[in-house]
Image: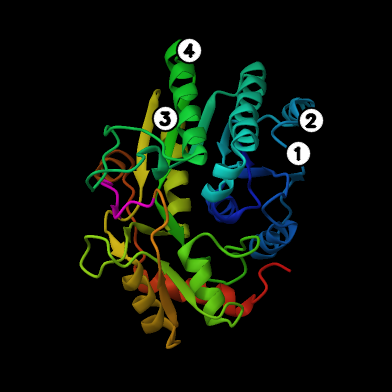
Amino acid sequence: MKQILVTGGAGFIGSHTTLELIQNGFKVVVMDNLSNSKIESLDRLEKLIGGKIPFYQIDLLDKESMIQLFKNHDFDAVIHFAGLKAVGESVQKPLYYYQNNVTGTLNLLEVMNNSGVNNLVFSSSATVYGDPEESPLKEDGPLSSVNPYGATKLTIENILRDLHYSDSKWRISLLRYFNPVGAHESGEIGEDPNGIPNNLMPYVTQVAVGKLQKLNIYGNDYETPDGTGIRDYIHVVDLAKGHLKALEQLFSEEGLFTYNLGTGQGSSVLDMVHAFQEATGINIPYTFAPRRPGDAAICYADVSKAERELGWKTERTLIDMCRDSWNWQSKNPNGFE
């Protein structure tokens, strides 16, 4: 049984991927500093699988603790989610983001290298495409960043490319996510952001549950059919399954691989609001606010490469995403608290 270290495994995407791995026969160890996640998510995971999940509260900047962790376990691969991820905060605290995301990843890579662990799936982001002029976005398209968060993801991708080219024993998959939403169908785990959500779906569900009065939609004057921004929303369970496929590829094939993980379909903010209302029967009051700087009008993925090379594609619809998000939020109005 292969043993996988999941950094950031108590977080939104990390917890769903941990569940998917365990359900597919992998042994998983979770490492998380709990700065933007809750230990309760792992308690819920253990309830779902009916067993224990080894957990270590370790920060990426604590290299000595990571060295000890790798001495204690014989890992076959690492799936690396751990990192700070709020775009707005990254603009206000760029040094904090570079230190945590880039330096932390360098620490992890050094410990992996010294331990002879050379299989890595990296949690990247569609932000590495910067402010795209056209969609759908392809993996070989131009890369740039418009904020420090995106810059950290792009910097780490460059580091990993250099690492692979310097030493081909490194097998690496760079997974560029679009907009993860939804929750596990059980309603036991889901997205639990700190403070007022930065992302659309948790904002919508918090309005639906009565925690927030109304949804602010930033910009209704884009050149799109309804004036609101278009994004590629992907169900978090489909996203987790993409990690499983990427990991399996690393065990059977040498190389450095880059994949977009999205649906390949663009949906506007109002499309998502209407889908939520259809899925739940709950009206979502909203008002329009000025555009946010750096927000592109249209951004969605070309996912043909992942389908062709990994045999992966999404199965869940906007209605599924909305239904599962509401199932989680309605059962857990205050998240994991």
Q: What amino acid is labelled 1 in the image?
A: Ile
- SS class, disc 1: loop
Q: Position of residue 111 (x, y in %)?
A: 67, 22
Looking at the rendered structure, the secondary structure element under dot 4 is loop
Q: Which label's residue is closer to the chain start, 3 or 1?
A: 1
Label 4 and label 1: CA atoms lie apart by 28 Å
Q: Position of residue 334 (x, y in %)?
A: 68, 73
Q: Residue at x 48, y 28 (%)?
A: 155
User: Where's the N terminus, which quadrant?
Assistant: top right
> Residue 233 lies in magenta, yes or no?
no
Magenta segment range?
295-303
The residue pinned by badge 1 equals: 58
Label 2 belongs to which residue?
A: 65
Q: Which residue is mark 3?
A: 252
Amino acid carrying label 2: it is: Ser
Q: Are marks 2 and 1 in contact (CB under 8 Å)?
A: yes
Residue 167 has which mark? Answer: 4
Question: Is 166 placed above or below 148 here?
Answer: above
Query: In the rendered structure, which amino acid carries the disc numbered 3?
Result: Ser
| Near-viewer residue (296 or 184) | 296
Label the magenta part by its dominant secondary structure.
loop
